[in-house]
Every structure is written in structure tokens, then in C-alpha cells.
Amino acid sequence: MRQIVLLRGINLGPRNRVPMAELREVLAGAGFDGVATYLQSGNVVLTSGGKPDALARKCERLIADSFGLDIAVVVRTRNELAKVVERNPLGDVAKNPKRYQVSFLSAKLPTRKVDELAALAVKSERLVASGRELYAWHPDGVARSKLWAALAGRNLGVTATARNWTTVTSLLEMADPD
């Protein structure tokens, strides 16, 4: 089964550096097939028969053992990612894919937490929660966005990692069978 492995917070600055070529070698050496990476920000597509949660834990252990880093991992199957793209709840307003973000969560957020996040959005921003994903549109960018700061922070109560729409759709293309 093709699965998408999303590492949280790597290669964004001088900390948590994980070279993608080495990561591919580590994962292939652990027995995963068809290991491919996208960009330098911790996006991996591979084949594994394991359940997504178990795969996430295994990848976290491999990264800790190989790179000495404590990196959170979220995994989606190819079919789960296809549903994320199919839902596209903000497609009618999100016209710039670089400013349209999907946060992938390890578990669904309570309604109260989603309401707290929505209250941080300025008038032009949009937030839609759907299962274990949060779709956010930041037309003015993320630099001064309180919503983005909350989504990117560690106070959601679950593991979360975000990707822009271009990355989301590219990972789906990579996971698709030839």
C-alpha cells in the first residue's frame, strides 16, 4: 500500500536537519519499497503493508536512531490523501496554492479547539476542519497570521504538520500507481 509519511518541522532552519538522500536510504534499508521524497521538508512516499499509525511510530524510531532527532511523523495512505484532495473545501476561494494549507493531524480536534482556531482568523482567512485535516486559506500570507501561528505551534493537543496545496497534490501524484 502506498503511504505518505509527513515529518514535522525538519529542514526549516539550522535545527532538525535531515538530508533527504540519507532518509531515503534509512527507509529503504528498513525494508520499505518505492521510497521517494519531495522537496527538502520531510515529504516521503513509500510502500508499506503496515497500518499508518504503526508506520508513523516506526519512522519516528528510525529517525531518532539514525539522525538523533525527535521528529513527529503523521502518515496518510494514498486513498486517504486522495480524499483530502477530493474534499478541497476551500477550492472556490483559495486561488493561490502556496497560501492554501492543509494541516494533517494525528487525531481529530475537539470542536472547542476548532472554534478557538477559527476565532483567530482575520476576515480574509478561512478555516475548515474535516476529520483529521484542517484546511486553511491565508490570502495575505502567513507571516503575520495568528491563525497560522496557532496551526504551526505545538498547542493543538495532537501532532500536526502542514503542507501547502501544491505539495499535497504533488504527493498524491507521486503516490498514484504508474
Image: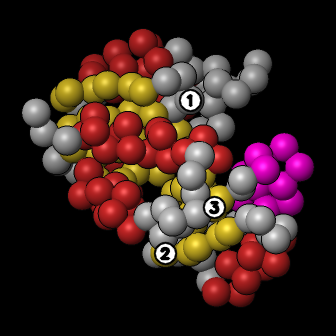
Which mark's residue is nearer the viewer, 2 or 3?
3
In terms of sequence position, does the residue under pointer 3 or pointer 1 come before the other? 1
* Element carrying mark 3: strand
| Magenta-highlighted residues | 140-154
Q: What residue type is labelled 1?
A: Ser
Residue 150 drawn in magenta: yes
Tell me whether the residue at label 1 lies in contact with that at label 2, contact meaning CB atoms closer than 8 angstroms.
no
Nearest to the observer: residue 112 or residue 178: 178
In terms of sequence position, does the residue under pointer 2 or pointer 3 come before the other? 2
Which mark's residue is nearer the viewer, 3 or 1?
3
**Label 1 environment density (alpha carbons within 10 Å; few <14, some 14–19, many ≥20):** some
Residue 158 drawn in magenta: no
Reading the image, the residue beneath label 2 is 130
The quadrant of the picture occupied by the C terminus is top left
**Label 3 environment density (alpha carbons within 10 Å; few <14, some 14–19, many ≥20):** many
Reading the image, the residue beneath label 3 is 136
